[in-house]
Image (cartoon, coloured by chain):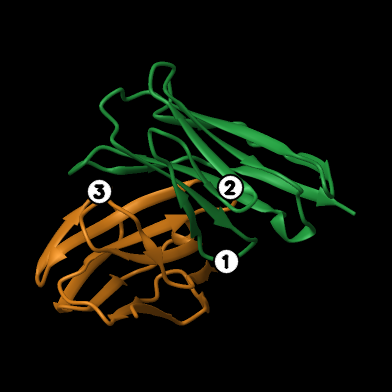
Amino acid sequence: SQTIHQWPATLVQPVGSPLSLECTVEGTSNPNLYWYRQAAGRGLQLLFYSVGIGQISSEVPQNLSASRPQDRQFILSSKKLLLSDSGFYLCAWSVQRNEKLFFGSGTQLSVL
Amino acid sequence: RKEVEQDPGPFNVPEGATVAFNCTYSNSASQSFFWYRQDCRKEPKLLMSVYSSGNEDGRFTAQLNRASQYISLLIRDSKLSDSATYLCVVNKRDDKIIFGKGTRLHILP
């Protein structure tokens, strides 16, 4: 069966520090991968998606970037965090693009 | 009009009651529809897909009304464990998935 792992579960970072969140999927090949952010009391916002290694599409211009160095690995990064980057970050995968999504357990990021 | 709209609630419902909520969508070309459940500070989990003919999974029934552009979720014999936020999800193939902001449900003992 397929599983998705996301870490860390919680993270507290000072403004201006770098960020690296990692997500891996097991039990499937060539998954579609996504990064979402959910701010407190708000809906899910798609940040990035990837249909293959090295192929990244950005939905919203921002302080973040994503990379897919391996087929089942998706990384969210920032060189300098802003206060507004705080939120609940979720990695997800799907078999076909924009079909059923399966989410990782999320990372609660607090930028102070 | 927002792409996907849900009543944010909260819906406060006594245990054992039946509750239903709707979700409206603006894009008539939307092709796939889902309900997700999200517990506080947890990831959304797929509850059920929504098919044109309507579908049922135990106490949960989902329906799609393409003419009026809404989907619905009905929960029968509600349990305390049903307390959560229910997210409506709509997509058009090869386009973005759109998540609603969710409807909060509180089942009262």
Q: To which chain does the residue with label 3 belong?
A: A
Residue B33 position, x and y percent, is: 39, 41
SS class of the residue under badge 1? Answer: loop
Which chain comes out green in the rendered image?
B
Circle 2 packing at 10 Å, graded few (<14), some (14-19), many (20+), is many
For this view, does B73 lie left or right of residue A98?
right
Return the mark for residue B86.
2
Within the image, what quadrant is residue A64 found in? bottom left
Could you tell which of marks 1 and 2 lies nearer the N-terminus?
1
Return the mark for residue A14.
none
Within the image, what quadrant is residue B6 found in? top right
Residue B10 or residue B67, whichever sits in front: B67
The correct choice, above or below, for A3 with respect to B37 in the image is below
Residue B74 position, x and y percent, is: 63, 39
Distance of mark 1 from mark 2, alpha carbons? 12 Å
Circle 1 packing at 10 Å, graded few (<14), some (14-19), many (20+), is some
For this view, does B40 lie left or right of residue A30?
right
Query: In the image, are marks 1 and 2 on the same chain?
Result: yes
Which chain comes out orange in the rendered image?
A
Q: To which chain does the residue with label 1 belong?
A: B
Distance of mark 3 from mark 2, alpha carbons? 24 Å
The correct choice, above or below, for A65 with respect to A69 in the image is above
Identify residue for label 3: A59
Identify residue for label 1: B42
Within the image, what quadrant is residue A17 found in? bottom left
The correct choice, above or below, for B47 with respect to B52 in the image is below
